[in-house]
Image (cartoon, rainbow, N blue to C red):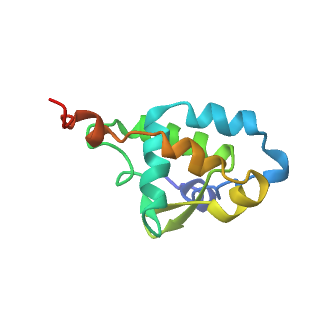
Amino acid sequence: MHVPISFLMSRPFHHPSLHDVSIDDILRALADPARRDIVAKLLSCNGMSCREACMDNTPASTISHHHKVLRACGIIRSEKQGVEVINTVRKDDLERYFPGLLDTILRHHQTPAAKNKPSSAE
């Protein structure tokens, strides 16, 4: 059976211009704590694969969905590098269009590890 090469090649990722993104789209995407956690992890490095940015027990379809949502609203940029997709936060672009938004939201985000850590008052 012959499979056309175009079928085997992955489609390029769509990264919207931030002119086309609303603050509502960004807030909706970051309303999910798992996606806030992904963004927080990506901000702490120069790029990370989809799998590395998520909890170990997260199903692949859920990981893919979270990254698709973050990409569609302009928060992350995804680039294929070999067999992996490396993601980065579009921090400079976001800061230019929505100054301070990411920092403000993530300042109040608690990572899963911090949630499970006993407080000093206990």
Farthest front residue in view: 121
Left or right of residue 18: residue 79? left
Q: Residue 56 is drawn in which quadrant?
A: top left
Q: Report if residue 64 is visible in the image.
A: no
Q: Position of residue 107 (x, y in %)?
A: 50, 46
- Residue depicted at x 66% and y 52%: 100
Q: Nearer the viewer, residue 69 or 97?
A: 97
Quadrant of the image for the C terminus? top left
46 up-or-down from 97: above or below:
below
Q: Residue 105 is drawn in which quadrant?
A: top right
- Residue depicted at x 74% and y 50%: 98
Left or right of residue 2: residue 119? left
Q: Position of residue 63 (x, y in %)?
A: 43, 41
- Residue depicted at x 43% and y 44%: 37
Q: Residue 92 is drawn in which quadrant?
A: bottom right
Question: How many labels, in total?
Answer: 0
36 up-or-down from 2: above or below:
above
8 up-or-down from 116: above or below:
below
Left or right of residue 111: residue 69? right
Q: Report if residue 34 is visible in the image.
A: yes
Q: Nearer the viewer, residue 74 or 116?
A: 116
Q: Nearer the viewer, residue 39 or 59?
A: 39
Q: Position of residue 7 (x, y in %)?
A: 59, 53
Farthest right residue in view: 19
Q: Nearer the viewer, residue 112 or 114?
A: 114
Q: Position of residue 18 (x, y in %)?
A: 78, 52
15 up-or-down from 68: above or below:
below
